């Protein structure tokens, strides 16, 4: 078995790199995980860029995700330029481009995935300890200068937050690119509402590269070796070597002992940090990038936010050059001016999905004019002035909810930052799931939609809250970013009125004069109104895969009822937007 071979399976020099395939790294419990090491052909000590995750280091981007690769290269020719692209893999750096910049690239298959044996359990303390061990291994190799940087998208970003809080001594800098930080709030339970998307993700992106597929799986296009390890296991053996991931998440509806070790202690993240988010990343990642930036204790930290598809700018010259300058400064000690770079790098989004680069010094922006738009239930409008008359409006939980609209703007405004809404509600049931959608409509009344990180028909903003999770953490909450502990349920008494503060994830848009801002409050996921787009294992209808419709967790009895919204007078419900003067 590969587990018994404590050397690399192959060593070769090709494409101006020295490559060691399947290098063994021994974990603290004795299990051996496997890494590919790409390094310069000239002997020396170099900084390390390391990734640890489940997507199989032997599976090429082109082989595993051919449509995404083809479209990205067609639209962004800088991605494939200056590389043979033979070593491209999903959501990690291209070693050809980084090795020539005098970096060592280390790709580790996480426990139970790809070429690494073991039991698969994502974001578990066991997996985080493995990541820690890999960082420390890379920091003491003869080809390492002792400084390890973490850089990667999504999974390869999410686990950075957790391991950084463990403070591995050789970790010198980190770049979580579009990476959620809070496993509960960012990833599995939006506002306390379960999203089932991790289950099909697991079935379609992890189990098909699990260790033990052996001859039943795909082959590495360069070495010819099986992507899923040299051992071929039965379906029963494979199932016994992995958690039932969907059930694992469904079984924990509150933040309990399962979730606590999967949520980083931001106060313990002190390493230099470049957090890179995507305005279209609602439902995953974006909140983690802004929260991680704000709450980490790192003295040297930067926030960058861009647009376009989830993976694109990580590979374009724009993104790669930002990453390179950051790591050159902290891993090589180059005096390249990075320390003078403004701390916040924003691509400001226009209504036509174009972007203008602008650099700032803090997040949220200090000059933000936090502006309340008050809900008028009687007229279904938004008002810049407090509404005096008390009124209410009801909607069927299974219906399209209620939309509150602001009159057409008299002049252009910019909205950039976190948003929120304060509501007063009652329900005919003992709970209510609140789905808030922030819209912009053009002068003809057509909704302005964007290419999200995944879904091409994304609205301006989303917020969610399960009313029984309405309790606030007073120490962490701000008016513009309410924070809910999610440690207990406080069910509703049908007919009683409750105050609810709803977090709406950050957004950015410059809205022209004559356009209209609107807020919809409803009891189900947003649908953009057009034809669904089937992309294989999920359907895109405005929220990508991040739906909240799993009947096992949200049974029909919970989505069959009436919610009433109250406004005016002492119940001054409002939408809070970060207007930039």
Image: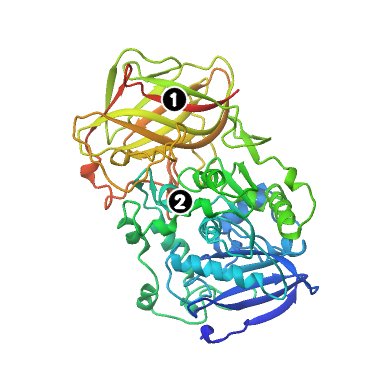
Residue 319 x/y as whole percent: 67, 49
Residue at x 42% of width, y 80% of height: 233
Q: Quadrant of the C terminus?
A: top right
| Location of mark 2 (residue) | 182
Q: Residue furthest top?
A: 388
The reply, left or right, for residue 153 in relation to residue 537 is right
Depicted 407 relative to depicted 340: above or below: above
Q: Is residue 370 shown above or below 186?
A: above
Q: Is residue 353 visible from the viewing direction of this image?
A: yes
Residue drawn 60% across and 42% down?
305
What numbered label is drawn on residue 143?
none
Scheme by which the image is coloured: rainbow
Give how far across and how far down residue 257 sits, in percent. Answer: 35, 59
Classed neighbour count for the residue bearing mark 1: other residues with Cα under 10 Å, few (<14), some (14–19), many (≥20): many
In this picture, is 264 found above or below 84? above
Where in the figure is residue 354, as x and y percent of width and height? 63, 34
Q: Residue at x 61, y 73 (%)?
A: 137
Mark 1–mark 2 contact, CB under 8 Å?
Answer: no
Q: On the rendered structure, is 68 left or right of 527?
A: right
In the structure shown, which secondary structural element does the residue marked by tag 2 occupy? loop
Percent position of residue 333, x then y: 76, 57
Q: Earlier in the sequence, mark 1 or mark 2?
A: 2
57 relative to 551, above or below: below
Toward the viewer: 311 or 303? 303
Residue 530 seen in render: no
Indicate which label's residue lies in the foreground, 1 or 2.
2
Q: Secondary structure at mark 1?
A: strand
Q: Is residue 329 or residue 96 the one in the foreground?
A: 329
Which residue corresponds to mark 1?
A: 518
Crowding at label 2, few (<14), some or many (≥20) Cα neighbours within 10 Å?
many
What is the distance, in whole Å, between disc 1 and disc 2 at their CAs?
Answer: 29 Å
């Amino acid at each position: 078995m590969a587990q018994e071979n404590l050397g690399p399976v192959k060593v070769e020099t090709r494409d101006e790199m020295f490559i060691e395939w399947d290098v063994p790294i021994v974990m603290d419990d004795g299990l051996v995980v496997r890494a590919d090491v790409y390094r310069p052909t000239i002997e020396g000590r170099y900084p390390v860029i390391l990734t640890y995750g489940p997507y199989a280091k032997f599976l090429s981007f082109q082989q595993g995700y051919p449509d995404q690769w083809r479209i990205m290269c067609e639209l962004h020719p800088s991605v494939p330029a200056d590389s043979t692209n033979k070593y491209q893999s999903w959501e990690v750096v291209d070693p050809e481009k980084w090795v020539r910049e005098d970096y060592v690239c280390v790709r580790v298959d996480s426990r139970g995935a790809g070429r690494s044996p073991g039991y698969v359990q994502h974001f578990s303390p066991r997996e985080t300890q493995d990541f820690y061990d890999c960082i420390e291994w890379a920091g003491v190799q003869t080809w390492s200068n002792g400084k390890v940087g973490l850089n990667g998208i999504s999974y390869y970003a999410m686990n950075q937050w957790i391991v950084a809080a463990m403070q591995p001594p050789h970790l010198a800098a980190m770049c979580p690119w579009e990476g959620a930080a809070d496993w509960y709030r960012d990833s599995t339970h939006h506002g306390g509402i379960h999203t089932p998307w991790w289950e099909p993700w697991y079935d379609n992106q992890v189990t098909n590269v699990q260790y033990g597929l052996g001859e039943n799986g795909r082959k590495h296009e360069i070495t010819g070796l099986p992507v899923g390890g040299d051992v071929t296991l039965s379906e029963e053996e494979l199932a016994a070597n992995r958690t039932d991931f969907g059930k694992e998440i469904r079984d924990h509806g509150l933040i309990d002992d399962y979730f606590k070790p999967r949520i980083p202690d931001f106060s313990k993240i002190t390493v230099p940090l470049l957090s890179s988010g995507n305005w279209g990343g609602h439902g995953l990642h974006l909140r983690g990038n802004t929260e991680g930036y704000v709450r980490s204790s790192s003295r040297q930290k930067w926030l960058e936010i861009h647009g376009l598809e989830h993976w694109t700018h990580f590979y374009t010259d724009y993104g790669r050059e930002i990453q390179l300058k950051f790591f050159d400064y902290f891993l090589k000690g180059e005096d390249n001016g990075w320390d003078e770079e403004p701390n916040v790098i924003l691509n400001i989004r226009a209504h036509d999905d174009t972007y203008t680069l602008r650099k700032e010094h803090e997040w949220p922006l200090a000059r933000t004019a936090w502006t309340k738009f008050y809900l008028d239930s009687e007229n279904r409008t938004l008002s810049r002035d407090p509404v005096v008359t008390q009124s209410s409006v009801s909607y069927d939980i299974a219906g399209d909810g209620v939309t509150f609209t602001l009159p057409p703007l008299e002049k252009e405004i910019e909205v950039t930052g976190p948003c929120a809404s304060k509501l007063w509600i009652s329900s005919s049931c003992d709970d209510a799931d609140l789905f808030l959608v922030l819209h912009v409509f053009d002068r003809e009344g057509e909704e302005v939609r964007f290419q999200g990180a995944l879904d091409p028909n994304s609205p301006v903003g989303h917020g969610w809250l399960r009313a029984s999770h309405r309790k606030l953490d007073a120490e962490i909450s701000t008016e513009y970013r309410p924070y809910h502990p999610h440690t207990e349920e406080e069910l509703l008494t049908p007919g009683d009125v409750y105050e609810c503060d709803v977090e709406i994830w950050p957004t950015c848009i410059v809205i022209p004069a004559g356009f209209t801002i609107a807020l919809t409050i409803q009891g189900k996921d947003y649908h953009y109104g057009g034809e669904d787009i089937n992309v294989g294992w999920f359907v895109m209808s405005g929220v990508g895969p991040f739906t909240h419709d799993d009947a096992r967790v949200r049974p029909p009895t919970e989505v069959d009822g009436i919610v009433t919204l109250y406004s005016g007078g002492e119940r001054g419900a409002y939408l809070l937007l970060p207007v930039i003067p």
